[in-house]
């Protein structure tokens, strides 16, 4: 069927079934345009001079379709990144509000933000701690926010302070695997969170060994030459459980 010869009702049915079909309609009405982009946001590339309403409908359906929108308003930009954070890579000179919205949707999107402010960095790592991998020279505040969200994100932090180390292991004890020469305080916090994280600690002290087996008795399997205090503790536990 030649869609140009079709009635508006027939055109509407066509684009509602497949938004791409608007490519074959000359001068579609706004009703047709809206129906097309609501079915497939990318179909906006075949619409000349789309209205703000059509632009918003397109990016609300597919945020990445903003790549086909010339000079999008901030409202359209915000709608796009709220639907798909990574669409910020298609926006020239996004405002701080747009940057914040993007990373709040997807922390990883910070990798597409040039010179992100600390507010943007914080929003990114609070959404996804691992996004700190893409932040150059993050402040301690950003580091802390990252590891409090995902302790394992410490693997992407160079020379973390003891405060950051403690925050990481308190969130996920196994993150001690990525900490070089952790203090006893960090070791204790790690094994108190997850006993078996002792497997990542070289030469744990008696206090650390005890804390590990108290949290999880099976962590004894990861302790070479357990101290007498640990043996005594497990022996008493065994008797109490009989």
Image: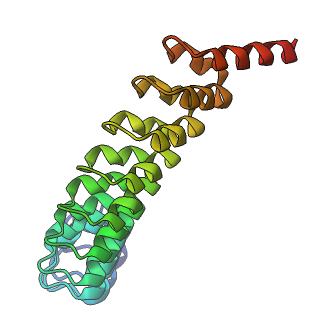
Q: From the top left corner, tell me how far across and down residue 157 is, in percent.
A: 27, 50
Quarter the C terminus occupies: top right
Q: Would you place residue 34 above or below residue 126 in this image? A: below
- Describe residue 127's horizontal placement relative to residue 190 as left or right: left
- Describe residue 56's horizontal placement relative to residue 209 as left or right: left
Give whichever of 219, 91 is nearer the camera. 219
Residue 58 visible within the image: no
Colouring style: rainbow
What residue appears at the point 21 percent right and 56 percent down from the top-left corner?
A: 134
Q: From the top left corner, tell me how far across and down residue 199 is, in percent.
A: 45, 23
What residue appears at the point 66 percent right and 21 percent down from the top-left corner?
A: 217
Give whichever of 107, 55 is nearer the camera. 107
Residue 18 visible within the image: yes
What residue appears at the point 15 percent right and 86 percent down from the top-left corner?
A: 49
Quarter the N terminus occupies: bottom left
Q: How many marks?
A: 0
Q: From the top left corner, tell me how far across and down residue 80 is, in percent.
A: 29, 73
Quarter of the figure with residue 111? bottom left
Q: From the top left corner, tell me how far across and down residue 97 is, in percent.
A: 30, 83
What residue appears at the point 40 percent right and 49 percent down from the top-left corner?
A: 165
Quarter of the figure with residue 178? top left
Quarter of the figure with residue 102? bottom left
């Amino acid at each position: 069927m030649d869609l140009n010869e079709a009635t508006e009702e027939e055109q509407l049915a066509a684009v509602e079934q497949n938004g791409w079909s608007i490519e074959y309609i000359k001068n579609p009405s706004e009703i047709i345009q809206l129906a097309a982009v609501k079915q497939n946001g990318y179909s906006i590339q075949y619409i000349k001079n789309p209205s703000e309403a059509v632009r918003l409908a397109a990016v609300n359906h597919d945020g990445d379709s903003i790549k086909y929108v010339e000079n999008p308003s901030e409202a359209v930009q915000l709608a796009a990144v709220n639907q798909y954070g990574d669409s910020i890579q298609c926006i020239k000179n996004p405002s701080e509000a747009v940057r914040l919205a993007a990373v709040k949707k997807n922390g990883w999107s910070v990798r597409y933000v040039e010179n992100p402010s600390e507010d943007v960095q914080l929003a990114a790592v609070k959404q996804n701690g691992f996004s700190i991998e893409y932040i150059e020279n993050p402040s301690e505040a950003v580091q802390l926010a990252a590891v409090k969200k995902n302790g394992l994100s410490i693997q992407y932090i160079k020379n973390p302070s003891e405060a950051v180390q403690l925050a990481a292991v308190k969130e996920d004890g196994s993150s001690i695997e990525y900490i070089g020469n952790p203090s006893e305080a960090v070791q204790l916090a790690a094994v108190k969170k997850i006993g078996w994280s002792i497997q990542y600690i070289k030469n744990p002290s008696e206090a650390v060994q005890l804390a590990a087996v108290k949290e999880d008795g099976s962590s004894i399997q990861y302790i070479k030459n357990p101290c007498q205090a640990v043996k005594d503790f497990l022996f008493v536990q065994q008797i109490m459980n009989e």
